[in-house]
Structure formats: C-alpha cells, structure tokens
Amino acid sequence: MADKRVIIVGGGLAGLAAAIRIAEAGLAVDLFSMVPVKRSHSVCAQGGINACNEVARQQGYSEYQHFDETLYGGDYLADQAPVLEMTNFAPKVIDLLDRMGVPFNRTAEGFRDLRLFGGSLFKRTHFSGATTGQQLLYALDEQVRKLAVQGKINKYEFWEFLWPICTEDTDDKRCIGITAQDMRTMQIRSFRGDAVVMATGGCGLVFGKSTNSIICTGGAASRCYQAGAWYANPEMIQVHPTAIPGADKCRLMSESARGEGGRVWVPRKKGDARQARDIPENERWYFLEEKYPGYGNLVPRDIATREIFDLCVNQDMGVDGQNQVYLDLTHMDPGYLTRKLGGILEIYEKFVGVDPRFEPMKIFPAVHYSMGGMWTQYTPGSYEPSSPHGMHNPFDTSPVDSDIGKGMALGAPNNMQTNIKGLYAFGEVNFAYHGATRLGANALLSCIFDGLYNGVSVANYVNDCEPSKNPAAQFDQNIYDAAVKQEQAKAQKLLNSVSDGPADDATNPYKIGYELGVEITSASTVVKTGKGLSACLDKIHALNDRYQNVRLGDAASWTNQTLSYTRAIGDMLVLAEVIVKGGILREESRGSHYRLDFPDRNDEKFLKTTVVSYQPGSDDPHQVTFRDVDTRFVKPRPRTYGKTDTKNAESTKSDQPETATA
Amino acid sequence: MAHASTIKNFKNTPKPDRTVQFRIKRCDGPGQPSRYESFNVPIESGSNVISCLQYIAANPITVTGQKTTPVVWDAGCLEEICGACTMVINGKVRQSCSCLIDEYAPHEGDVITLEPMSKFPVVRDLWVDRQRLFESLEKVSAWVPIDGSYDLGPGPQETPQQSEMRYTLSTCMSCGCCLEACPQYQKEDDASSWDTSFIGAAPLSQARLFNEHGTGRQLKGARLDALMGPGGINDCGNAQNCVKVCPKEIPLTESIAAVGRAVTIHSFTRFFTGK
Amino acid sequence: MATQKNSPLRQHHFLLRRLHSLSGIVPIGVFLILHLTTNATILWGVLNSRAGSDMLARRVGTFQEEVSFINGLPALLLIELTLWISLGFHSILGVYYAFSGRPNVREYPYPDNWRYTLQRVSGYVGILFIFYHVATLRWGWSFLVPGGTQWSHNFAASTLAAAMQGSEQGYTVAGIAVSLFYFVGVSLLVYHFANGLWTAAITWGLTISEQAQKRWGFVCAGLGAGMMLLAWASIIGFATLDYDAAAEIEGAMHSETNIPAAAQSHADNTNP
Ligand SMILES: Cc1cc2nc3c(=O)[nH]c(=O)nc-3n(C[C@H](O)[C@H](O)[C@H](O)COP(=O)(O)OP(=O)(O)OC[C@H]3O[C@@H](n4cnc5c(N)ncnc54)[C@H](O)[C@@H]3O)c2cc1C
Ligand code: SF4
Ligand code: SF4
Ligand code: FES
C-alpha cells in the first residue's frame, strides 16, 4: 500500500512546524513553497514571541493572564478555547525553540532575556535580537532539512499551489490533493494527499504596499475560498503604527522599539520647524503616554495607529506637516540599542540613511497583518466554567491550570480543520486566535502552536478517519487529471491574451494590481465608513471587469512570472471583495475595524464571527453569515486600555481619509 | 504621496525627478544566449532597484522603444533579510532591495547595470538557481540534532557572549554574496561536482555555528570530516572577499580560521586515537 | 576540480593540502631565509673584520667563505634532495590548486583580494625564477646566461656578478634584464613566503579573531620586510660588483690556501 501522505502548502513558521510534527508521526510529507522555505515571509518578523515565563510568573503573571490579554487585545472576537490552549502551550514552544538552537538573547547569568511588548504590563516576550522571526524560521528550517535528508520530508520549492482537489460530494466534501505549478518549468501537476495543510500566510499585497513580503498575495487562501472553504473575519486587517513608507513597500519598525523604551511624540506646536533635538522636553507631546498612562506607548496596535492617524490626518500635527510622527530612541544607550534592536535599526539606517540611535525615526502606520483568514473549527477541551470569568488581575489564582487539553482537545481530528474535511489552515492564514486585533509577538506563537499542536490532529485524521478507510492513493486518476486540465486551461487563457497585443493601462495586470492597492488601502484600513466601503466595492468590481480582459506581456513557457502574478491578481480581487464586504456588514467598531459611522462596539449584534462562503454564479457570490463567538471562559469587557480622555477618543473628522501607504 | 521620511541624508544630494537608465543582462533560460536591454526609469525619492524593476515589469519598453517581456527576478522581503534578491549591480554582488537609487545613481541619466549572479546557473534573466548553497548546508549537517519536537524542557544554558556570537553567525540568509565574490568558488552546472568543488564561506561558517551549540556539537566530527575532503575548508585561498561583501557583516574569515583550527585538532586526534 | 573519484589527490586531500602549507614554511621558507642571509653577505660582509681590511675584500671574501662552507656541508646531497622534493611538491600542487581559483580583482578590488591574486602570480613567477636561477647557477646551463658566464664555486661572487650584469666587462642590455628578473623574482618569492606564512596561520587555525589575524599580519609583514631588505641588498651587491676586482680577491684567497682547502679549513673551524 502506498504511503500515507500529507501535503503542506507553505514553508513559513506554521508550515515548517507542521511538517516537523507530522513527519515525526511517521507520515510522508510533501512541502510546497513559492520560495525556498528559508526565504518565507516569517523571516521578516522582528520583535519576538510571547509566552509566560518564570520571571513574569513570580511577578504575578500567568498563562491565564496571557490568555486574558490576548482576548482583550482582540476585542473578544476570537473563540476563547483555542486561545486558551495556545497561551497554555506557549512556554513549551519556547523551550523547544531553545533546544533547536535559537540564539535567544540572554541575561548576564545565561537565562533567556525578556522584553516588554504591546498589550501587556509584563515582560513576556522572548527575542533574538531584532530578527526573531528569522532566527525561529531558520531553526525550523534546519530541522526540516534534517528530516528531508532522512527522506521524511519532500520539499517542492518554487512550486506554486494552484487549487485544492476535493471530492464532489458537497455535504461531506473532502480534500484529497492539490494542483501546483513549477515556477521554473511551468509544469502543472497534481499531487495526492490524505490531508492538505494550508500555511500560506497573509495577504498584505492586496493592499499594494504593506509590511509584508511580495509573495504575500493571499492568492492561495483565495483559491481555497473559491473552491468552497469558508473565509472568516476578512475585515480584520491590522495596520501597524510604526513603519517607514518606501517606494516598493513599507518597512516595519517593530513594536520592540517601543518595548525597549522607544517613545512616540510630535512637537506640541503645529508646524514646528526645528530639528527634533532642538525641541525641549516640555515642548514635545508624548500623546500616547499622556492618553494611556498605564500602557503608554505600548497600547495595542490599532489604538496607536488610530491615534497617530488622527493626529496627522485630522489634526495636521504631523512632523514637518507631513504624515509622520517621531519614534524616539535617542535617550537610550547606543550600545544597548545595538544589542537589543540592531536588526531593525540597521533597516532604518539602510533605507532612510539616518542613524536612529542619534536621531528620532520618522514613522507612519502601514498595513501589516490579517487577523481574518480561512475559517477553522476545533473540539473543545476539558475546561468548562459554570459562568464566564470577569477581569483577571495579576496574582489572582488562575481559574484553570495550564495543562494541555484545557482549551482544545489535543489531537481531535477537526482541530483547525476548515469546513472541508482534510483541508487545514495553520498560521496567519488561519483566523482562529487573534480576534479583531493581534497583540504583538503573538503571531509567531500562533504559527508554531498551530504546526506543533494541531499537526497531531492532522496525523490523527489521516490515521483514524476517512483516509484510513479510503486513502487518497486509491482515488480515480481522472479526478486529478481533470484538476490539472482545469488549471492548464486557466493558464492557457491568460497566455493567449498575449496575442491580443500589448496591454494598455486598463488591461495591464500590474496597473490593475496597483490600483487595487490604492483603493482598498484608502477605504478599508484605519478608518472606514459604509459609504467609502461601498464605493470601494464598486471600484473593485470595475477592476474585476478590466481583469477579465487582462493582457499579459509575456508568453514564455519557461519561468513566466507575469503569468503567476496575473493569476494571483484575479484571486486578490476576489479576496478584496470579501474584505470590503465584511467591512460593510460589520456595522460596529471593534479592534482594528473602525467604522466612523458606527464608532462603538456592539456585542449584541456583532460579537460574532463573519463567515463568508463562495457561491459562484449567484448575484452576490460572497455569502456572509455571522456565527456566535465562543465566550464561555471570559466575559467581554470594554476595551479602553485605561484611556484618560475618552471623550476625544478616536475622534475623526474626515470622511474619506487616506493613509500614507496609499 | 509625499512623505518626509523619504528624504534621505545620504552623502549625495540626488537630483529630484530624474531618469535613470537600467542596463539589464537578460537570458530566456538555461542554454539560451544572453543579451543586454536598457530601460529608462523615472525615479521618485525612496526608489530602489526593486521598485524600478517593478516599473519595468509594468512598462516593458526598452530605450529604443522596443516592446519586450517583463524582466524576471527573484525577491521576497524587500528589507534585506530573506536573501532572495541578490544580483550583480554595476559589477558587484549585493541585494537589490537595499540598493537605493538616490545613493547609487544620484544624477540624471546615470546608468545602473544589473546582471545575474555568475556563480549559479541562470534560470531566467536575473533569477539564478542557488540550490547548491542549500545542499551545502546538508553537507555540513547544519542543524542541532534534537530528539524530536516534543516537550523535553529547555535547551542548554549559555552566556550572553556565546549567544551573541551564535546570533551573529546565525543571521546568514543564504544570499550567496560571499560565494559570488570568492575567487575560489566556481560555477558548477553539473550537480555531481558540487560535492568536490569548493563549498564557500557561508556553509563553513554555518558548520562553526552548530559546532558552537551545546547539542549541535555532537555532530562536530561528522561536520569536520565533511569539510576535510575536496571542496572543503582547505580549498579556501584566504582572499577574504567573502567577509567584505557579506551584507550581514558575518565574521566569515574568523569562522574559516575557527574551522581550520577545529580541523587541525580533529585530524591530530584522529591520527593518534584512531577515532 | 575534475579529479577522479578515487584519485589519491582526493583521498588524501587534507594531508596533501596541509603538507603543501607546511612545505612552504619548512623547509622551503627556512631555506629561503638562510639563502638570503648568505647572499646578503655581499653587502654586510663589510662587517667581517676577519676577512681583511679592504671593504671589497671583506664582502667578496665573506661571501666566498659562505659558499665554500655550504659546499662543504656533510650530507649536502640529502639536504639538496629534500629541498628539491619539497620545491617540486609545493610548486606542482600549488599550480594545480591555483588553477582552481579565478581571480576577480577587477570587480572586487579589495587589498586582501590583491594579496590573494598576487600570491598566485608570485607563485607562477617564482617557479620560473627558481628554475632559471638553478639552471644557470647550479646545472651550468650557461646558454641561458647572457654573455655565457659559467658560475663557479670558487669564484662565486665574481661569476655571479658577471652572470647578472651580462658580461665580465659590466652591464649589457640583456644583463639589465637579468638583474631586473632577479629583483622581481626574489621580491615575489619573499612576498609569497610572508603572505603564505600569514595565511597558514588561518589555515591551521592559529589566528582566529580579526585582531589576531591583524597582529600576526604585522609580524609577517615585518619578517617579509626584513627578508626583502636582505634580498635587495644581495641584488644590489652583485649588480654593482666589479668583476675584475672581485675575481682578483677570490683568486688571491685560493692561492693562499689549496682549493678547496679554504672551505675545508673553515668548516673545520666551525664544525667541531
Ligand atoms: C515585518 C513584520 C514583522 C513581524 N514581526 C512579528 C513579531 O515580532 N512577532 C510576531 O509574533 N509576529 C510578527 N509578524 C507576523 C508574523 O511574521 C507572520 O504572521 C507569520 O510569520 C506568518 O507565518 P506563516 O507561517 O503563517 O506564513 P509565512 O511565513 O508568510 O509563509 C507563507 C508560506 O506560504 C508559501 N506560499 C504562499 N502562497 C503559496 C502558494 N500559492 N503556493 C505555494 N506556497 C505558497 C510561501 O512560499 C511561504 O513559504 C511580523 C510580520 C511582519 C510583516
Ligand atoms: S577567504 Fe576563502 S572563502 Fe573567503 S573569499 Fe577568500 S577564498 Fe573565498
Ligand atoms: S555569509 Fe553573508 S554573504 Fe554569505 S550567504 Fe550568508 S549572509 Fe550572504
Ligand atoms: S528581497 Fe529579501 S533580501 Fe532583498
């Protein structure tokens, strides 16, 4: 009998962690990635990874507090059980990474050092310089390399996932493989898999310029969605407060800069033309510290972003009258900064030409992360409080211990499985953990947690469920051949457009992509309005019409990047519609989703997950339903972060604001 | 949109709104002839080579008005951390994403030449196949041999100095600059010669990295054995170009010397103990 | 490198590489130092008061004594053989190794890269030079010497001067070329040795940190500079030596004692 095989699409932290765990379970793993896995987008992550630790514990912190913070940060939109399991599991993730050789920063005595991060008053973020994602990714990459040498993992690098192959049966739809294309030879092939794990990361490229890598198109998720997988909370897009806008992308200045003591300010006097260093302390407005005395510069990202945005766009208080504020580290010891933040300071120096150790950085918000993603399910664990708890304070006894299996049932085959059997979603492409805002340094955790913890579920599904009776290896070859034909036809159609002659502005795929980014960034990021979103949706439809006549500039049958990009543009347009549609229907403000016309949170109507399913052919193909959020553990409370001046909170005047990322 | 942070404090004061010419070495695929094509690209402040390539992709028209295909290149992070976008710019290897036009070509009509790396087979245009580099990492067992991914407590404790030293080595992004600039590292189209042709600085430095880890040390012998043969440490000619072109400023020549010492000791021990 | 799977070059790669490194220092480098010191007596021989009072006589005499001493060494053949084998081994392997590199100073004009490239070039030139030097002076291939001077043990300084100047009467154009070749050849060899000594410390892992490499670099540069001075001293010494005057002094030395008794007696004095 043929091997039991699992396909993993994506070689970021989530995909690699899953590959390791599933290969260790004895299943053959085929790992697909558009880039060598070592170059996956996770390499960009800078600040760190959260987990409860001994030092924080002795100061009153706990796994439960981490759990509580994550829910609060996410404005209670996340189902609580998976979050509890993740935060309980977090210390194990750190230990494992440590054993793998991640060079975590150390204290003088040799213990792992910790730093402060957004949304917490405790140091609970483990880090490796300011390139933590790189170090974690490399550690996992090395382990995967080892397993690949042992023949347990097959890497397909420079292969693009095209479509999931599913059984027809609509009620009991099952994923049994994928089609993929070799980006060099352009060969399109089908692969059989008893389970398929999507770990394809975020969709920043939909917004044109973001902090993401240029491969983060969201194309893979969009294809799964179009193949029948549900998409959840699409409107929840995180805009990071501190980035450097550039011509090709916005480069992130990690939250760790603030975690290590960085202060955000603008001159108190509008249009103050003096150099930063010439402005005395009492003429600087540390507006975050002033408004949020507790968390100060470390309020969650959506809040900091809106404050900066409001200041620059509505009050015109930006430095030099531009859309920018100071992020200041100059009061700190340069040697200390180099040790703790070297990686990001270098980025600033390289791309702006100024040394941030001696001159304050100038930053502005940029699109960063998608809390929304493919919808997934789980089996609840053993913790069942009679009623939800209220606010949890430091030193309070945790209502539940941190053992495995309290939040989710370990190994349950449906953990983080989509609505399609055998199709899983891990990492950023999974909507499960971050609700309406992700706390800094929780993403790396959720990615690795997904891979390690829910990798077991994948193995169990393959060993015990449908695949054990009816393995993918035994399905009719025709299903796979048909899937390949379908993709070949799509590609051919695009290639044929070359013979229609050169593209004009209306049919140039790069221009369509660019315009999409501009439109959706201005209407659907920091501040949204119903009117603006509707107008944006119309524009996306218009772009979609243009896309139907798109013309490629390259007919090559070898390494045709234009083909790959143009195909992705089509999928990004679909995803963009979903994102905007979700934003229109969520008539409230919650976390990163801020509606000027509905500025308050509305738990009664919208403490619900937006779930979108694709119904091609119908008038509006994006069918939205709202599903209740699991709030059995903690009672939602207002999310103020101790703001002092609530009257002026997040007030904005402009109706059609724009961001610097446009 | 105007944004003041794009005002650069570089030595050159770039001329605003200028046009820069890109001369790009193109090749349609393995075994195909190569040719140069030139493109005029308008420069906005903050432009880098990547944003210019993006412009060319959207407007693939040469200086002579010829319609051509978009240039193919490799990129990922756009912040010099993934290593993908390495190419030869004006004769020197470096990352193209961190190559800012204001710094590189501050004048109207400046020419920037882009070529693919020469030590790796070209896939198409500026995209090369660096698989050999990743296989070299297999050759030196560049990993910590842990028992598995289940929870077994923390890893070995180490001093901040040790971890800082390993961190520095561990920032290698497998970009291949050090290999491109090394006079001893040769292009090998035939994968069967990879094993015996000089391995280059990056994998040597990775061998040192893992030899320095408490658990990684267990494979030290195997790593050194692999590096004692043809293509190993001894084929380094000490030109020290590697350390100068490494964008991560990894002390590669120190790594080479450290591996040299380890190999010396290893060979003596083996000679006298038979192990 | 396109070596066969089981070729000895591959099987003993490490050993050969390290022997190559070692042989450049011991015996070749050590010999080079001694040889240069000996030759330089043609200048610093003036300090040797035992060789008479005339300055020229001191220089020529001391040099002649040294040559005779070396020629009289016991087991000279063995010493010579060791040198031959080492030189052959170091050269052949060196050329083979050097061919595996492709210099790129044009693209990467760093000082270290020049150093690397010059190490290869100096190797090639050095081999040519040593061949010429040995062929003309040791094997007596006088057809390669402009003017056809045959070097003689007993008239060591004068015949060498004639060989380098092109004739017994002084400079000829070809003679200038030979002198220049000596200048270039010896300088490159000294460079080759000093730089080789520096890189050997990296190869063997003696110097690891950048500072250590830098410090050792100063030591090697100092040694190289000293040797360079010796080398240039010898060349200047011979290139400016008057053939007739030197030959007269040598002739006088040999008429005093029986040839090669001079060497013999000297050897007896120093080698108990
Ligand atoms: C600049 C920056 C800094 C960050 N810093 C932090 C931080 O400090 N802490 C934190 O917790 N989080 C941080 N994040 C967020 C975090 O990095 C990401 O959410 C996380 O890395 C996502 O990992 P992933 O495994 O889900 O996907 P990715 O790492 O994005 O990997 C996606 C993988 O899928 C593959 N793929 C995609 N599409 C296809 C396709 N069609 N076919 C085949 N393969 C495909 C890609 O090749 C890639 O291998 C940061 C993010 C950014 C942008
Ligand atoms: S020191 Fe060695 S590895 Fe580095 S460039 Fe020179 S020959 Fe290559
Ligand atoms: S050592 Fe430096 S130059 Fe070489 S691959 Fe690594 S990062 Fe690139
Ligand atoms: S694109 Fe990642 S290094 Fe340039």
Image (cartoon, helix red, strand yellow):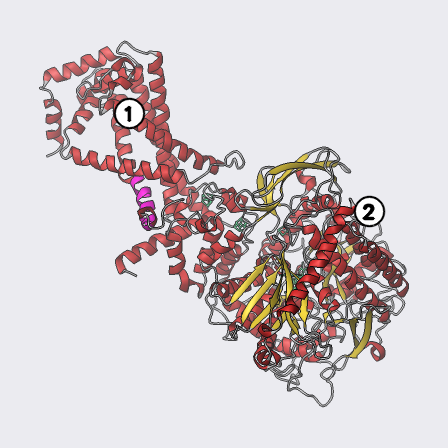
> Label 1: how many residues lie within 10 Å, few (<14), some (14-19) or many (20+)?
some
Which residue is pictured at 59% across the width and 43% down the height? B116
Residue C4, percent from left and from top? 36, 47
Subunit of label 1: C
Q: Is residue A46 visible?
A: no
Q: What residue type is disc 1 on? A: His
Choose between A425 and B148: the one closer to the eye. A425
Q: Give the alpha-carbon distance from disc 2 to disc 1, as whole Å.
A: 75 Å
What stretch of residues is rendered in magenta? C11-24
Q: Which residue is mark 1?
A: C133
Q: What residue type is disc 2 on? A: Asp
Q: Quadrant of residue C36?
A: top left
With respect to residue A204, does C120 lie above or below?
Answer: above
Residue that protrudes farthest toward the top in the picture: C169
Q: Which mark is residue A505?
A: 2
The answer to whether C239 appears left or right of A447 in the picture is left
